[in-house]
Image (cartoon, helix red, strand yellow):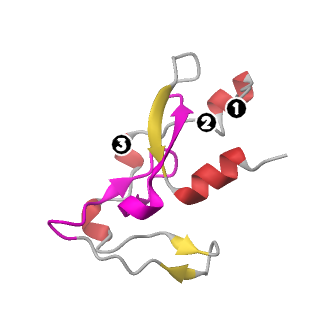
Amino acid sequence: MLHLTSADRKTRFHMIPRAHWVPDQLAPQCQFERGGEGGRQCSTQFSFFQRRHHCRRCGMVVCQRHSGNRLPLFPKPNSLPKWSRVCDRCFRGLIMTD
């Protein structure tokens, strides 16, 4: 079970608005990098059959394989959470903390 503070709602578990997502036309392939920043980028190219998915926390465009997680994110600090698609990097960053 996740125990979230009001600060978590405003920062760590905040859902970014669609206007801040990476535009589809700037991401011909999955933006997920294995091993973190500077790691090897996923080679999945987007097409009619391979759909783009936006992480609702960071706005990055990722493939199905790197966006299979969902977490409760808050569109506004005092709103109810929405279970939202998040990329593997955001999922690990939010769940695997001290």
Residue displayed at 64% across by 30% down:
10
* Above or below for 31 versus 43: above
- Residue 93 screen position, x and y as percent: 68, 52
Front residue of 87/19: it is 87
User: Disc 1 residue type?
Assistant: Asp
- Residue 37 screen position, x and y as percent: 62, 74
Q: Secondary structure at mark 2?
A: loop
* Earlier sequence position, callout 3 versus callout 1: 1
* Earlier sequence position, callout 2 versus callout 3: 2
| In this rendering, position of residue 15 left or right of residue 1 | left
* Above or below for 60 versus 69: below
Q: Is residue 73 magenta?
A: yes
Near mark 1 (Cα within 10 A), the count class, few <14, some 14-19 or many ≥20, is: some
- What is the spatial separation of the Cα atoms under label 2 and label 3, in whole angstroms? 15 Å
Residue denoted by label 3: 18
Residue denoted by label 2: 13
- Residue 77 screen position, x and y as percent: 58, 22
Q: Residue furthest right?
A: 98
Residue denoted by label 1: 8
Magenta segment range? 47-75
* Earlier sequence position, callout 2 versus callout 1: 1
Residue displayed at 61% across by 81% down:
38
* Above or below for 8 versus 40: above
Near mark 3 (Cα within 10 A), the count class, few <14, some 14-19 or many ≥20, is: few
- What is the spatial separation of the Cα atoms under label 3 and label 1, in whole angstroms? 20 Å
Q: Choose mark 2 or mark 3, whichever is in front.
A: 2
Q: Secondary structure at mark 3?
A: helix
Residue displayed at 47% across by 32% down:
83
